[in-house]
Image (cartoon, rainbow, N blue to C red):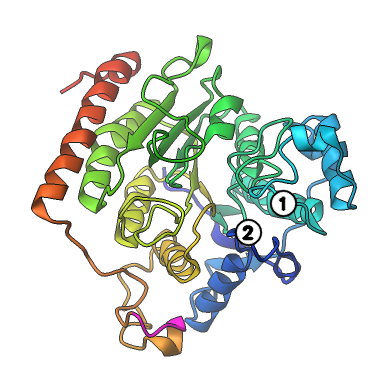
Amino acid sequence: MKPAGCKIFFHSPELDRYRYPPECPFDTSRAGQTWKLLRSMGLLSGQDRKVLSPRPLRRLEIEQFHTAAYLDVLQKADRGSLDLRGLRMGLGTADCPIFEGMYEYAALAAGATFAGATALLSGEASVAFNPSGGYHHAQPDRAAGFCYINDVVLGCMALAKQDMKVLFVDVDCHHADGVQNAFYRRRDVMTISLHESGRTLFPGTGFEDETGEGEGTGFNVNVPLPMGTHDEAYLMAFKQVVFPLAQAYDPDFLVLELGADALAGDPLTHLNLTNNAYADVISMLLRFERPILVTGGGGYHVQNTVRAWALAWTVLCGDSGVTDPSVGMGGVMLESMDWVGGLRDRVTVPPRNERAGIERTVQATIVKLQETLFPIHGLIPP
């Protein structure tokens, strides 16, 4: 059944106030820049869509996942007090620096994701997009990988509380370890993460044999990818592993972490995607005709990330078949002279010898996952 409801984009000027330290590669301005670009293109107006300002989550709401002791330390660190316990909880590192407003920002970003889940549950929205969300590394009692409060876990928990099945798909280049750990023994939330292999990228987890435990066995799926993975190999894995498992699971709600750091040119990662692959992934997920909650995530080439998220919004809203008003306008619409082809990236094809090696590695991963997971879900491996 096709979901009713409008498309909600979550953003507010308050979110734009907060910044990680300038030496940190995580740039919170990406969400505001995405909002600005979409507004300039007229893609946030219309009867079927609206922009909403979130409220910060309250302590008790955050404590549904995070420990009170951790939140106490996090709030004290925000006020400039960091002790040995805070260091042991991952604070004060290059990845999770201390800065003024860190707790308020994390609670506000999480509030947007939580509000998105609430809007889907009520039927107010069929699509909710929070580009300020996607903090999938945060653990109950520890910060990690630029992440202080795990909004994704809180959003999935809110949806699953209604006795609904939730499919979480993460296309961020880094493994969704915090989300995996939260639901590793559960089957009401199926977690699927496509990411650069932990052999070459933080957090060093997310291998094929991490498939869940107890009731959750077979409901945690990892698709580790080799460096240089391109669109064709990526979509091959999605079509042959993710889509069949999603069909078999038949979720009530979809949650997508749309980290843009798997794009070619990202300074922290080593995959080679274009945003066309992201658009294709979203189009395939929309075929399930289920309400979908989308968050941001990584993405350390700011212009590429903003363009990818803007393109994602057009696909989520069904505008992908409409002529892109930015095509040919380059710096006028996109504030960049690098590319005048609109929101979509150039289609790229790796050299044949490089492509063949990557595709062999990805195909081996596909076969392993099909043999391991398909029988659990009543699917027959090809």
- Mark 1 neighbour class, 10 Å CA radius: few under 14, some 14 to 19, many 20 or more: some
Q: Is residue 331 positioned above or below 209 on the image?
A: below
Q: CA distance from mark 1 to mark 2?
A: 8 Å
Q: Reading the chain from its start, which is encountered first: label 1 or label 2?
A: 2
Residue 365, visible in the rendered structure: yes
Q: Is residue 308 positioned above or below 331 on the image?
A: above
Tag 1–tag 2 contact (CB < 8 Å): yes
Q: Amino acid at mark 1?
A: Pro
Q: Secondary structure at mark 2?
A: loop
Residue 50, visible in the rendered structure: no
Looking at the rendering, in which quadrant would you find the C terminus?
top left
Q: Residue at x 47, y 63 (%)?
A: 309
Q: Secondary structure at mark 1?
A: loop
Measured as percent of width and height from the top left, residue 113 is found at: 64, 49
Measured as percent of width and height from the top left, residue 58 is found at: 84, 45
**Residue at the disc numbered 1:** 97
Q: Residue at x 58, y 26 (%)?
A: 181
Q: Amino acid at mark 2?
A: Cys
Measured as percent of width and height from the top left, residue 106 is found at: 73, 51
Looking at the rendering, in which quadrant would you find the N terminus?
top left
Q: Nearer the viewer, residue 64 or 148?
A: 148
Measured as percent of width and height from the top left, residue 220 is found at: 45, 25
Q: Nearer the viewer, residue 291 or 72?
A: 72
Residue 153 highlighted magenta (yes or no) = no
Q: Main secondary structure of the magenta part?
A: loop
Q: Residue at x 48, y 68 (%)?
A: 306
Which span of residues is magenta-colored?
A: 334-338
Taking the view exactly as shown, the residue that stands out farthest to the top is 214
Which of the 4 quarters of the picture holds residue 288? top left
**Residue at the disc numbered 2:** 24
